[in-house]
Image: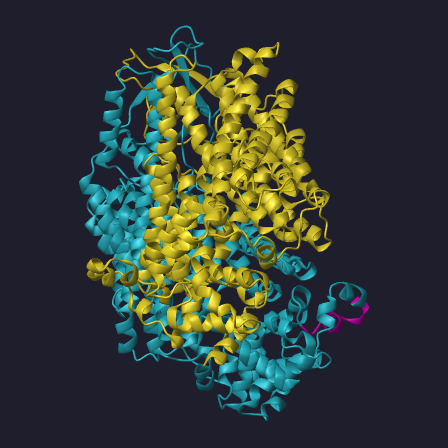
Chain colours: A cyan, B yellow
Amino acid sequence: MHTHTAPVRRTQVERCCWPSSLRLLTVCALIAGCSAADTDITLDAKATLNHRIQSLDLLVFVFLLALTVLTIWLFKHHRVSWLHETGLAVIYGLIVGAIIRYAGTNTTLVHMQVEPQGIPTYNAKLPPDTLWFKYPVNQTNATKLPEGVKTYAYVFRGQVYDIEENEIDLKATFDPEVFFNIILPPIIFYAGYSLKKKYFFRNLGAILTFAIVGTTLSAFLIGGVMYGCVKLMPNYLSSSFTFLDTLYFGALISPTDPLTILAIFHDLHVDVNLYALVFGESVLNDAVAIVLSGAIQNYGEHYSNTGEFETTAFLRSLSDFFCIFFLSLLIGAVMGCFTALLTKFTRVRDFPLLESALFVLMSYSTFLLAEATELTGVVAVLFCGICQAHYTYNNLSEDSRQRTKQIFELLNFLAENFIFSYIGVSMFTFPKHHFDAGFIITAFICAALGRAVNVYPLSWLLNIKRKPKISSNFQHMLFFAGLRGAMSFALAIRNTVSDARQTMLTATSLIVIFTVIIQGGAANFFLNWLKIPVGVDDETEQLNNYQVHSVYNSMDNSHSAPDVEGGGGGRGKTRLSSGADSNLDTPLDGNAATATIAAGGRRRNSHEKAILARIWGNFDTKYMKPLLTHSRPTLLETLPVCCNPIARLLTTTQQLTQDGSEFRRVDSDSDICIDNDTGNGLSQDGLGVGRRNSINRMEILEHVQSPVSTRIRLLGFYGKKL
Amino acid sequence: MHTHTAPVRRTQVERCCWPSSLRLLTVCALIAGCSAADTDITLDAKATLNHRIQSLDLLVFVFLLALTVLTIWLFKHHRVSWLHETGLAVIYGLIVGAIIRYAGTNTTLVHMQVEPQGIPTYNAKLPPDTLWFKYPVNQTNATKLPEGVKTYAYVFRGQVYDIEENEIDLKATFDPEVFFNIILPPIIFYAGYSLKKKYFFRNLGAILTFAIVGTTLSAFLIGGVMYGCVKLMPNYLSSSFTFLDTLYFGALISPTDPLTILAIFHDLHVDVNLYALVFGESVLNDAVAIVLSGAIQNYGEHYSNTGEFETTAFLRSLSDFFCIFFLSLLIGAVMGCFTALLTKFTRVRDFPLLESALFVLMSYSTFLLAEATELTGVVAVLFCGICQAHYTYNNLSEDSRQRTKQIFELLNFLAENFIFSYIGVSMFTFPKHHFDAGFIITAFICAALGRAVNVYPLSWLLNIKRKPKISSNFQHMLFFAGLRGAMSFALAIRNTVSDARQTMLTATSLIVIFTVIIQGGAANFFLNWLKIPVGVDDETEQLNNYQVHSVYNSMDNSHSAPDVEGGGGGRGKTRLSSGADSNLDTPLDGNAATATIAAGGRRRNSHEKAILARIWGNFDTKYMKPLLTHSRPTLLETLPVCCNPIARLLTTTQQLTQDGSEFRRVDSDSDICIDNDTGNGLSQDGLGVGRRNSINRMEILEHVQSPVSTRIRLLGFYGKKL
């Protein structure tokens, strides 16, 4: 708990390393100048100085970010492709870190050994929360205390492990929990919120395999190999590393970072399935890694007494892992759905500002709720983000959609660049780095090995049943896309108590820096070299791989086929007309819904591999969407007749009374679903006509700066329809 | 500096009061359950628990805010006008605070008196930064330390003034500096960013008088009267209050809060001049109050030894006040202009995300820069916000304009509601309240008195020269609009060391709660009662008070008069045609610029009171806007011929090559300036035709959700022109 007893000035925001000469000089000047002054004033001045230094610390980072932004613009402007924005942030961070390191000297903190006053009575197992320390001051001012003695409060900070190191540590770093509580949540939430659900669900099996099985496999493999290697090393390392340490290293180095690669993929319009694989995997494996590393930590601290393998402890850790992961997932999903219900059944959308505020607050409370119940907030916000995008987004007003997307996009951008800058800066200024060439080289090799084990065997396994095989080019690209990033670094810096952990942090930092700069820079070249198609449109991809059908496709065949005859430019009109009477949200007409789902489900036996996606899709279309959004069919149509009263209660008038006059609004309700609808229509007729209409309008809003063209086009169609 | 030595989990975000039974119970259960376990594990568990409790604290606030948002919607939906959103937030805060207070019991923190080990050597005037405390633990686990003793680090917190009170304080409050570093900056920045500049500059004289003279006057009056009253009180209060204390109270209770009143004004479309007066004054008096209170604090701590009046100390404080205020203003303005230059001379607008990020980073760095140089960050961001709106906004892309406005609107909304909720909650949970009925009643009376002294005499003074007098109705409304809010509370809670300060905090909290709920609720009624015109359009106002002319009007007479003959619907066309060849940004044709300015400046002697605004307006139009935005006339036209090379360098090709084909972009560059142009045109012809065109497009974007109508209209006009 932070308190404020004296009129000292402190800031609560994150702070960074700034052991500069400036600080030393000013403190000295200050103390020297005040030699005759009161202790109070000196203390106050010192507090003010601290506040100034902290502001300066942050200012350096903010300027660094602004500089990065300007340079990114310059690079984009001149189409420089060999260095990407995250790489740039890291490089700038390294430069600034080096300047701070070599330009600065360290201030020494004054510390004092104390012992209890009088006879100590230790009535608790815990050390006291605060120490009260009487300090004699030579005061020039009259105060109430007669003896010239003041009592100062000191609050508990932590255990001192190493007398020499702790000194530097106490002043030069900022709390790594800032990453987990402030920096990572918006990044992860935005990843969930901006997920392209259609391709994500289409590749769900592969993504889950890579993310859950692959990451775990990779973690254990890296842990094992590293342990073997470390034990072979002749130096002190072999004694300081336990198997748990190397396993923890395996867990933290396994998750891949999507940022750099995906930015490149996005710019080049790489094949959407590859995009979905890389994105989906890297988003989920962050979640897996954080829970996995937590379980390993718990195993070491709570369950195991010896540090060696114990079956019961292992099983408890395993159940921990699954419980925490799925409960976090559940909290995230429930909060997402709750927000959807709130936005569906209230008319808060009439006030977009309130609506956006509600959206942000509910998303943030998901994180806090998970943290308050000892689950993993980062995992919860990820799934909350997915649910918000899948359901709540459909209920939001146009204004809130844009606003929430833009806000989280900006937050994500700032947070990302901050963390990469910090990785660079901390390489020089973090006092607990521990360089060991042997360990670092082994770590690099193991990281690559772990990625290979994740990609190749699992791809082979998936290809047995998967229809559009993951080609070897794609596999190589998946391997190459295994950049390490924010999550690895955050996990590594979270715990730097022991030598082993410090060595791990150094290796992790170097791996992150290397992969982000070198692999990120070479990604463009590698894409060319592997002849991976770029400049692929969503629809082109669909035409090429039209064998790949999600539940939405198979479900829609009976329905959308007749529409297609219109062909050509009429495609847009057809969509709108079907939207006007049966609602655009789902490809199913009200009455035919159940029958079609059942029939569609069985029609194509060749696509059984998408069974997970199909079951979920059915359930989603029949129950979740009607319940949580304004989409058709309503629950009145999908639930058994006996449930009609409840169903009526859960169906809004808006859902029932959708007709032509409400088209505009309905249309904007169902951006995401339209996409599915139209996409498969196109894959049916195989002509690619009316392609423009099927581009998700969300994307249009992102890419084309003025939405006016879309509007006019829509109005035109609407007019045609009328 | 926050560090992380042990694997404890802490969060850096703000935390609140939660002295609930839950905490006590869980701590007890935890300690009891772990009686056989290791101290390490117990400590770790305690740290985890702390993290959970902090998450829970925040969660309570987030839920409270979500609830407030939903209730606001409900109230707006049902058009409830007797309770406003800030009032609602306060009431919910009070309820939750009461629940926490009476449902919870306090945990006792364990603290221990310590003394230095061995012979103490006090080589510095300052107490040590950290204490190292050896604590014997009965460990079941083998560790490296042989004696079963662990060393824990304790960091300096502050002086202990009162043994009993400090105990509760250390855990139950959160750092008041959070208000100044996290909550207030976005509120103040948004105030500057959303200022309606036209009416602000038009009423600049009155606003400055009210804000600077009025606030200072009010502060000294309240300080004096309170001091007299307090000295008359028979109890201990008279001894604990110094004149500086009451003066500080005067300074903190003088600033008024714009939120509630302005929200009502905005909903009802109250007369824009009244709106500008209230808004402008309350924004500026926040800035004045924070600097003034800082100067008073400094006077007490540094300059004065006796606490009584000393001339030199007073003069030093006075110069402090002016230096800090104007240097902060300067930093804010310079950073705003620097951002404008960055956005003008780079093409970063091609990437709206980068542009928005740059905008946010530069604005935040203004705050940090001011804080790092011991100035007032809040004042700096206010003027930075004004400059950003006045210059940078014109250079931004359409996307960034919306994004930045929406982001700061949302941040402002959340911060506002958080602070008002916290005021409510803290009324019950903050441990340092000190109720004294006499003081509170006196404070209420003095607050009203101070407001009256601010409004009535100054209005009388202003009315001597002012042409459209501030009517007595308006004066009453100005008096009534003197709600106290966030700034008063933040200043009061910043320092609660002494009894006097605690009494002041309690009085301030009550005044804020009372004025926000009662005055805010009655504002509607009061407006009716005073017969203040509502539902007033920008233009209607102009027609009524068309004698009121800003610099823009007087400057524009010669130029816009001929255009008006077109009359009727032709107004829009005229604007566009003049815009197409001479640019819409200013009402001045390139060549005629200097002459017109000179002539316009002297034409209307009856408007001499706007001299400040006029001088500034001239300078702004001739030099600042051409330099910082893409507007015409360019510097080539306004600077002397000898400066042509420099002027050419500072003029973008875009500025020079503006013609019809670039109309759309140019138009969006100059939203703000168009407003000035058209507004006075209308006041000239006095017909109010073409009124729709003169509605600021920014406002259209805010009010009408889809900008399509504007676009189409504009395109229509453009077509006409062609």
Q: Quadrant of residue B372?
A: top left
Query: In the image, B648: left or right of B689?
Result: left
Tell me residue B583's x, y (percent). 39, 68
Residue at 45% x, 23% y: name it.
A130
Quadrant in the picture for the N terminus of chain B: top left
B712 in relation to A172, above or below: below
Tell me residue A660's x, y (percent). 69, 78
Q: Is residue A491 visible?
A: yes
Query: In the image, A527: left or right of B460?
Result: left
Q: Is residue A642 magenta?
A: yes
Residues drawn in magenta? A632-643
Residue at 60% x, 33% y: name it.
B512
Q: Nearer the viewer, residue A356 or B287?
A: B287
A490 in relation to A33, above or below: below
Tell me residue A321's x, y (percent). 49, 52
Question: How many marks do you count on the picture?
Answer: 0
Query: In the image, B258: left or right of B151?
Result: right
Q: Nearer the viewer, residue B194 or A222?
A: B194
Q: Quadrant of residue B90?
A: top right
Tell me residue A558's x, y (percent). 63, 87
Q: Is residue A669 magenta?
A: no
Q: Nearer the viewer, residue B66 or A175?
A: B66
